[in-house]
Image: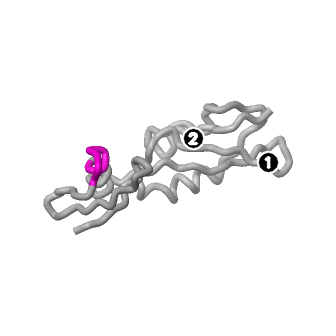
Amino acid sequence: MKEFTCIICPRGCRLSVDDNMNVTGNFCPRGKQYAISELTNPVRTITSSVRVNNREDLLVSVKTSGSIPKGKIFEVMEEINKLSVAAPTRIGHVVKSNILGLGVDILITKNID
């Protein structure tokens, strides 16, 4: 039996999943989907920051455009740490396309003038 706290909504249901993938403790159907996903293919969205190379001591926030496999987090972070951008830049600007061939882009999440 595996146990999870659902993070889909603020309710935070305590989920239990048995060996036959029966989910209990969920208030809504999304909790069941979350628990099964966490067992079969856990994914995460990454948020981080990259250097603005033409502004002294300035970072800009970035995030992945979608979810990545949980097992690839450290590899993606290594790639993000190598990135930099030049100001000005806008929300949604793609800093890196298709990072590690995962079909996910690294996007700017803050305007820098």
- The residue indicated by pointer 1 is 58
Q: Which residue is drawn at 17% across and 57% down?
A: 22
Q: Which mark is residue 48?
A: none
Q: Is residue 82 rendered magenta in the image? A: no
Point out the stretch of residues depicted in magenta: 26-32
Q: Is residue 28 rendered magenta in the image? A: yes
Q: Which residue is drawn at 18% across and 64% down?
A: 18
Furthest residue in direction bottom, as rendered = 1
Q: Residue 13: give x, y in percent of width and height.
A: 34, 56
The residues tagged by marks 1 and 2 sit, at their Cα atoms, a distance apart of 18 Å
Left or right, 106 with respect to 21, comes to right
Q: Residue 100: give x, y in percent of width and height.
A: 48, 46
Left or right, 37 with respect to 65, comes to left
Residue type highlighted by circle 2:
Ile
In this rendering, is residue 93 above or below 17?
above
Q: Residue at x 54, y 36 (%)?
A: 97
Q: Residue 106 carries which label?
A: 2
Residue 26 vs residue 4, the one in the foreground: 26
Q: In which quarter of the image is the C terminus?
A: top right
Q: How crowded is mark 1: few (under 14 residues within 10 Å), some or many (20 or more)?
A: few
Q: Residue at x 29, y 54 (%)?
A: 35
Furthest residue in direction left, as rendered = 20
Residue type highlighted by circle 1:
Leu
Residue 11 vs residue 1, the one in the foreground: 11
